């Protein structure tokens, strides 16, 4: 954890740049041509005052969650790559907020459950499973906080070992 | 070595190749070029758009696959992903050591450009 950046280390210009990049990816068509780029400001403004940092954090986390959803061809890769947060990643400080936003999708828990089932099947080695450590840590960090994991009959308890491991 | 002291060659460790194995080689090739988790996501979005003219979610909805499990996509779609990810991995492996930049974004952009170009080429050979 030595590399961990202090909370809210990201400065406003970087926040804006990253928010824009993710939004562009979501709204691009072929060759990176962004459709209706003028909508960006309006969409960010829906999260609050654009002069405020927390507005941009909210927008970034929502857009990152949308990108996680839109790039999820395989649910296990969501856990081993997309949500395998580690302190050296730029999105580490927002990991909980990104996951919160992702959990707003009605299928979110199902996607995560399917991913865990795949990872713990015979098709994956224990080494492969280690790549999900960042995600499993993230889940463990949420235990005992007011950040649950979806609803009460959701993931915790549904997957043997996940709820009781931490 | 057998009992007579003669060396025997070990059988190479091989297994049946499927879409998941190819996909992992593809993601490894992104990582080997310095790509991060962000460009991996961007590359998937880009690849899907070029190959199928839609988003990942639309591909699953349109074909009736079980969301986020590529083995439930129609065979033609699985093959398209598999071929493209295999060829993209070949291309990216060729680029290892040459992709660089001032920032992570620049590295990511170059990786994405390789995937985009390969996806365009692959698309030409697809029947739709």
Image (cartoon, coloured by chain):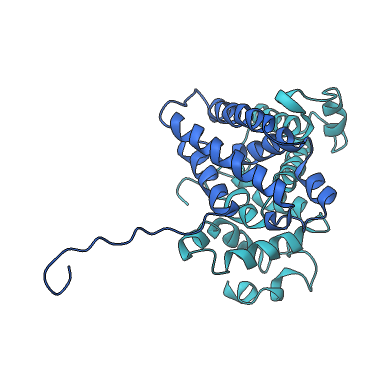
Left or right position of B97 against B21: left
**In-front residue for pair A72/A144:** A72
In the rendered view, tell whether residue A17 sits above or below residue B29. Answer: above
Q: How many marks?
A: 0
- Whether residue B90 is visible: yes
Residue B105 lies, with reference to residue A79, above or below; the image says: above
Residue A9 visible, this orientation: no
A121 relative position to A114: left or right? left
Residue drawn where x is 60% and y is 26% of the image: B113
- Residue B45 locus on image (x, y percent): 70, 38
Q: Position of residue A79 (x, y in %)?
A: 62, 56
Observer-nearest residue: A51 or B109? B109
Left or right of residue A115: residue A103: right
Q: What is the drawing colour of chain B?
A: blue
Q: Position of residue A131 (x, y in %)?
A: 52, 56
Chain drawn in cyan:
A
Q: Is residue B8 above or below residue B58?
A: below
Q: In the rendering, at what x and y percent does residue A11 appear? A: 64, 32
Quadrant occupied by the C terminus of chain A: bottom right
Q: Residue furthest left?
A: B5
- Name the quadrant containing residue A159: bottom right
Which residue does the image show at 61% across and 59% down from the upper left? Answer: A138
- Quarter assignment of residue B9: bottom left
The residue drawn where x is 47% and y is 25% is: B100
């Amino acid at each position: 954890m030595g590399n961990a950046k202090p909370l809210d280390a990201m400065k406003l210009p970087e926040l804006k740049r990253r928010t824009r990049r993710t939004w562009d990816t979501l709204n691009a068509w072929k060759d990176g041509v962004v459709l209706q780029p003028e909508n960006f400001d309006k969409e960010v403004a829906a999260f609050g005052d654009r002069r405020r940092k927390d507005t941009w954090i909210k927008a970034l986390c929502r857009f990152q969650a949308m990108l996680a959803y839109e790039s999820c061809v395989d649910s296990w890769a969501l856990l081993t790559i997309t949500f395998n947060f580690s302190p050296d990643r730029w999105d580490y400080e927002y990991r909980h907020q990104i996951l919160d936003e992702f959990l707003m999708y009605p299928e979110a828990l199902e996607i995560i459950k399917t991913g865990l089932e795949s990872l713990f099947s015979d098709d994956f080695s224990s080494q492969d499973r280690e790549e999900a450590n960042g995600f499993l840590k993230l889940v463990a960090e949420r235990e005992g906080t007011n950040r649950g994991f979806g609803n009460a009959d959701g993931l915790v308890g549904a997957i043997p070992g996940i709820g009781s491991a931490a | 070595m057998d009992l007579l002291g003669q060396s025997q060659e070990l059988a190479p460790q091989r297994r049946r190749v499927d879409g998941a194995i190819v996909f992992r080689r593809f993601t490894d090739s992104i990582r080997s070029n310095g790509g991060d988790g962000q460009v991996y996501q961007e590359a998937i979005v880009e690849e899907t758009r070029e190959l199928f003219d839609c988003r990942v979610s639309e591909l699953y909805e349109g074909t009736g696959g079980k969301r986020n499990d590529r083995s439930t996509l129609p065979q033609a779609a699985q093959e398209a992903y598999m071929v493209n990810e295999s060829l993209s991995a070949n291309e990216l492996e060729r680029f290892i050591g040459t992709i660089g930049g001032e920032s992570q974004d620049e590295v990511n952009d170059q990786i994405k450009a390789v995937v985009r170009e390969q996806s365009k080429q692959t698309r030409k050979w697809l029947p739709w």
